[in-house]
Amino acid sequence: MRPDGKRATQVLTRRVKQSVSEWYVLELLEKSWGGLEAHTEQGYNVGKPPYGYVAAKMPHPVPARRAEGACKHRLRPDPVRGPVVTQLFAWRVAERLGCKALAERLNEDLDRYPPPMPVDPTRAVGHWTQSSVREILTNPKHTGYMVWNRRATTSGRGRANPPEAWVWSSEPTHEPLVTKDCFIEAQKVAAVRWSSRNADGVSSHPNAKRTYSLRSFVFCAWCGRRMNGKASRGTVYYVCSPPKGCAPEGHPNTIRVREDLIIDELSDFLTDNVFDPHRPRNPDPEPAEAVVRIRSTELTGDRDLLVPQRAVVDQHQPVHPQPGLLAAPPSRRIELLLVPDGHRRRLFESLRMKIDFEWRTRTCHFQITLTRAVELRREATQGRSGRAGR
């Protein structure tokens, strides 16, 4: 017997019972997790349907549970909110808009784009927010696959689990609102747009005093972080100062590059590769037939309207040909600093421009992406809406 009065047998018995109890708990968790995985594989939804879908009741697959009135739910597209999700992803991928800009665009027409409704209606704010837009753009259920375990439920206070911990159904289980490729592209945009606003001009932050011409477009090639603008003694720099412990090995505490030097090289780059009238062009040899038909119809209608007007102009003001103009296309160097900030940002956004500064070699790598396919789809959409409005 121990000095405290306990015997070895008592201690052993208590430890064995504790071990058996822990084993039962872990076994129950494993079975419940396995059941939820099977539930996901069969395409049944857990919890509130994501925005764009409604819950369709299905008979419970177990006869005993079915006799008790139990049922399960599958996702069906919402005829009103489903198109909103599709449009949201289209804007995200084609125009690379941030969550705040997307929320502002949706709030312009709440009848057409109804905001999400929480489980508790008293908590509804009545308009779109950045978090509600982000929740839609990051929900993989919109691809038609059923996904479970996106958030921690037993620890971490509901923190988001890494994608490798998600449980996906092996096949699509409901009608998709976006393709899987579109969803992946939207996630890539999120990595680029993080903490960057789309609006031009000075930020609304009370400490903001100026704007930067290349804001959100300059990256550090060493660590991959976005470089932020900073003015010092009348000179504008772009600076990379990663937090302590987050910088790669050998990365200086601060890397900076002058804005005027980048803009000077960028002007030459755009002049030679984008605005040069003699640059090689590789148009899409097989544009979408629907786009061609739509554009042809529009041009025919425009021609019918302009031909009578041209006849009137020809009668009152004869045209004197000047063939010399054709031999002198504009070839002036692009001066980016003379372009208004709003137009300059829209130009950079349309080119999907990215500037990587390599500190070790003191060079900048300019990258632009000319998305002809996106423009064709956008023209087709505008053509359809234009005809509908006539």
Image (spheres, rainbow, N blue to C red):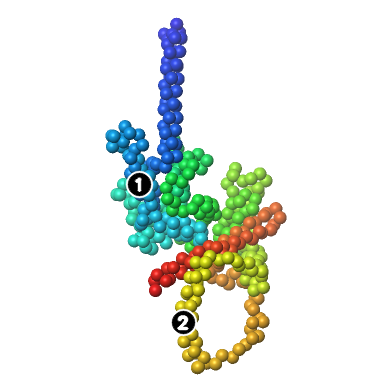
The residue that appears at 41% across and 38% down in the rendered structure is 39
The residue that appears at 65% across and 76% down in the rendered structure is 331
Write down the residue under mark 1: 55
Judged from the image, the secondary structure of the residue bearing numbered disc 2 is helix
User: Can residue 258 be seen in the rendering of this structure?
Assistant: no
Q: Count numbered badges in the picture.
A: 2
Write down the residue under mark 2: 304
Category of crowding for the residue at label 1, using alpha-carbon neighbours closer than 10 angstroms: few (below 14), some (14–19), many (at least 20): some
In the picture as drawn, the residue positioned furthest to the top comes out as 1
Vertical relation: 108 (above or below) 315 = above
User: Can residue 263 be seen in the rendering of this structure?
Assistant: yes
**Dot 2 or dot 1, earlier in sequence:** 1
Q: Quadrant of the N terminus?
A: top left
Snapshot quadrant of residue 36: top left
Q: x, y percentage for residue 351?
A: 57, 64
Vertical relation: 321 (above or below) 156 = below
Judged from the image, the secondary structure of the residue bearing numbered disc 1 is strand
As measured in the structure, the alpha-carbon distance from the residue carrying label 2 to the one carrying label 1 is 51 Å
